Image (cartoon, helix red, strand yellow):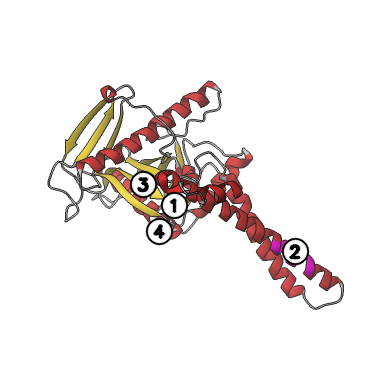
Amino acid sequence: MDKIERRSGSEDFWKDPEAAQKLLQRRKRLESDLDLLKRLQRQEDDARVLVEWLEGGEDVEKDLRAGLDTLEQTLEGAEFQKMLGGEHDRANAIVTINSGAGGTESQDWAEMLLRMYLRWCDRKGYKRDLIDLQPGEEAGIKSATVLVQGEYAYGYLSAEVGVHRLVRISPFDSAARRHTSFASVFVWPELDEDIKIEVQDKDLRIDTYRSSGAGGQHVNVTDSAVRITHLPTGIVVSCQNERSQIRNREVGMKILKARLYDLEMQKRREKLDAVESSKKDIAFGSQIRSYVMHPYRMVKDHRTKFEVGDVDRVMDGDLDGFIKSTLVARAKGTLGQAVSED
């Protein structure tokens, strides 16, 4: 902190505005960590004083219980935050949702998941920008990409990577039969500009097209949407959220670099035999979580066994229980695998 304070007070601090902003953001994170430690120390000191008073005959048992409860909650929060100590856990997140096999039913499910994550972002106070959306043929979406901006966005959402299964009576089936649908969730950290990922122009194919959103004033009638294909890897990124083609290309390149970085990290982990394939085919046999609406109502994470009976609450973005249980299990090394059947 002292080093940052000295640097921020120098005359040439704002000579490089981007570097200055990053340093200020780092200072803010460190201040947040220090405030948490000070709060823990203060609450512990208060509890010790109350214990001494109680032992001295003072009637402070009620105050002591309340103080210990507060200390326990703060300590749990600190331990949970410690789990998010990965290299990119504090970063913004790029979330992509893809519908699986099953046509309209799975595309509707993908849109339901998109809504669920947008609601979760609102609950956390995160800013979210819909970068790309490919509508379904009759209803729902084929895919969507969202940039989630906020501290620990990637750390939290990394717990959601995998295939999500829905079981319900399909509103698209005139015979009212029960259907099982799948959609996948992939998450990447938004990389800082100082993390260099080299992408050569000769390795790119860039196509432009008109936005294919739901319509209205936010859909540009010009060919402003951009699709970037990285030829060596086959990775395809689309962006149509911005009004200008130039800006869509900039955002698309940022997403492409994040995915290339993730791909490189996967290769390194595979060399160390430490990779666990959580991004499987969108099909039977690989779901991390099931959302059952018929014949009973339950949302269950198959890796942690954490479950909630209030499906509507979960679909409205109440995901913290699932995320926390996953991160805790991951930290303890007890996180289970995706399952083939419920």
- Residue 66, visible in the rendered structure: yes
In this view, the residue in front, 106 or 19, is 19
Front tag of 3 and 2: 2
- The Cα–Cα distance between marks 4 and 2, rounded to whole angstroms, is 36 Å
Q: Tell me: residue 35, above or below residue 110.
A: below
Q: Quadrant of residue 60?
A: bottom right
Q: Which amino acid type corresponds to the residue marked 4 in the rendered image?
A: Asp
Residue receiving disc 3: 147
Residue in view at x 38 percent, y 43 percent: 95
Residue that lies at the very extreme toward the front in this rendered image = 11
Residue 340 at x, y percent in the picture: 46, 35
Q: Nearer the viewer, residue 144 or 100?
A: 144
Q: Position of residue 129 (x, y in %)?
A: 32, 50
- Asked if disc 4 and disc 2 are in contact, CB closer than 8 Å, the reply is no
Q: Give the alpha-carbon distance from disc 3 to disc 1, as whole Å.
A: 10 Å
Q: Are marks 2 and 1 in contact (CB under 8 Å)?
A: no
Q: Decide: few, some or many residues near mark 3? Use Cα within 10 Å; few <14, some 14-19, many ≥20.
A: many
Q: Residues within 10 Å of mark 2 (few under 14, many from 20)?
A: few
Q: Earlier in the sequence, mark 2 or mark 1?
A: 2
Where residue 314 sits in the image (x, y, percent)? 44, 56
For marks 4 and 2, give the one nearer the viewer: 2
Furthest-left residue in this view: 221
Residue where numbered disc 4 is placed: 122
Start and end of the magenta stretch?
Answer: 42-49
Report the disc number at residue 45.
2
Badge 3 amino acid: Leu
Residue that badge 1 annotates: 150
Badge 2 amino acid? Asp
Q: Amino acid at mark 1?
A: Gly
